[in-house]
Image (cartoon, rainbow, N blue to C red):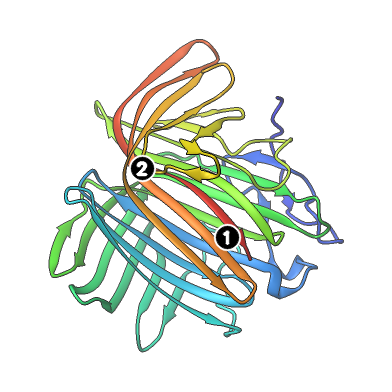
């Protein structure tokens, strides 16, 4: 598979279709929601942060899905283990006006119930969230700074077979965190936490099943991470699979998520295998927590299993370099949406 690297220019052409499909390590294509030719109700935009260490973690989402907005907070304690998720959504609300670029433009979303601020300050990302009614066990607040440890990221422009439909996505791995999280009447120092930003903009088709996995960790004093996934759109020009080691990146080809299954039933809490045809990527994923949800509201149906656990195995690059991964905590998910 020859993967096509994107060139500079506008993301969409005059018809609202991708001007070019492929990958890059920066948002080299200029996205502007005013160039979208499909209905605004089909446009989906979100910023999702996952930040954690091998003890605690948080996940934060601000999303505008055209016909509804959504904010969400998850808190994880891997030592217990346990997790709590609090989400709030509103149908046909005012558009949030999320930025067209991940590197500039702030998100400030405040109501009587919560405050979400994703800010850019002095070359860092400043994450401020306050949700007093998070749980009957206590409130949630966080004040975190995130700093990139590598200049590279995973960027992919993916077309769908349907006209005027596309997905533009950036995953910024290995974000070094500092600051505090106050959750459930406990204060956690996140100075050793590492995060990832999932920045997505696009017009999606109604029914999709996707697989995504992310690792962001430190091993033997080296930053090590990856972005692995597939399942949506036409990825014949490029995959979203990329491996990161300190400030270096390596592009990967197609991979497979082998989730234990009996008939049509997946066993998400049993060990998964993630690999490619040649076993250049050969990983075992051992689950700890399954953050699952199932919703069916009018025409919106969603079955999500975002599973957190440890990865072990090897990643071999061009049959030359081999990187060993030893019990590093990350996540892998299978999501089916009709949205």
Between 260 and 190, the one nearer to me in the picture:
260
Residue at image location 57% in from the left, 16% down from the top: 278
- For numbered disc 1, what is the local secondary structure? loop
x and y percent of residue 244 in the render? 44, 32
Disc number at residue 269? 2
The crowding category of the residue bearing disc 2, from other C-alpha atoms within 10 Å (few below 14, some 14 to 19, many at least 20), is some
- For numbered disc 2, what is the local secondary structure? loop
Residue at image location 42% in from the left, 26% down from the top: 283
Q: CA distance from mark 1 to mark 2?
A: 36 Å
The crowding category of the residue bearing disc 1, from other C-alpha atoms within 10 Å (few below 14, some 14 to 19, many at least 20), is some
Q: Is residue 325 left or right of residue 265?
A: left
Q: Is residue 271 above or below residue 166?
A: above
Q: What number of labels is visible?
A: 2
Between 203 and 191, the one nearer to me in the picture:
203
Disc number at residue 16? none
Is the N terminus in the top left, top right, bottom left or bottom right quadrant?
A: top right
Furthest residue in direction top, as rendered = 320
x and y percent of residue 126 in the render? 35, 63
Nearer-N-terminus badge (1/2): 1
Does the rendering let one see residue 123?
Answer: no
x and y percent of residue 335 in the render? 53, 52
Q: Is residue 327 left or right of residue 155?
A: left
Kindly report which numbered mark, 1 or 2, lies closer to the viewer in this rendering.
Answer: 2
Residue at image location 53% in from the left, 64% down from the top: 46
Residue picked out by circle 1: 101
């Amino acid at each position: 598979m020859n993967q096509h690297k994107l060139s500079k220019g506008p993301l969409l052409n005059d018809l609202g279709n991708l001007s070019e499909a492929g990958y890059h390590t920066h948002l080299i294509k200029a996205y502007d929601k005013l160039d979208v030719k499909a209905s605004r109700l089909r446009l989906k935009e979100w910023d999702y942060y996952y930040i954690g260490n091998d003890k605690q973690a948080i996940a934060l989402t601000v999303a505008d899905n055209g016909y509804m907005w959504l904010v969400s907070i998850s808190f994880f304690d891997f030592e217990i283990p346990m997790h709590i998720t609090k989400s709030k959504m509103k149908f046909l609300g005012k558009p949030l006006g999320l930025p067209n670029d991940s590197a500039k433009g702030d998100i400030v979303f405040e109501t009587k119930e919560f405050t979400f601020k994703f800010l850019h300050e002095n070359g860092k990302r400043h994450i401020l969230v306050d949700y007093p009614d998070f749980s009957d066990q206590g409130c949630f607040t966080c004040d975190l700074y995130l700093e990139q440890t590598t200049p590279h990221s995973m960027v992919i422009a993916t077309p769908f077979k349907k006209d005027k439909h596309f997905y533009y996505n950036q995953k910024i791995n290995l974000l070094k965190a500092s600051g505090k999280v106050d959750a459930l009447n406990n204060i956690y120092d996140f100075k050793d936490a590492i995060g990832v930003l999932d920045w997505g903009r696009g017009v999606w088709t109604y029914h999709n099943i996707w697989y995504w996995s992310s690792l962001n960790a430190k091993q033997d004093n080296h930053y090590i991470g990856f972005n692995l996934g597939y399942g949506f759109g036409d990825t014949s020009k490029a995959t979203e699979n990329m491996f990161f080691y300190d400030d270096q990146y390596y592009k990967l080809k197609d991979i497979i998520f082998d989730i234990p299954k009996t008939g049509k039933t997946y066993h998400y809490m049993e060990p998964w295998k993630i690999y490619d045809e040649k076993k250049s990527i050969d990983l075992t994923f051992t689950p700890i927590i399954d953050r699952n949800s199932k919703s069916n509201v009018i025409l919106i149906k969603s079955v999500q299993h975002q599973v957190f656990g440890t990865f072990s195995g090897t990643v071999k690059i061009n049959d030359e370099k081999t990187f060993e991964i030893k019990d590093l905590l990350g996540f892998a998910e299978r999501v089916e949406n009709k949205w």
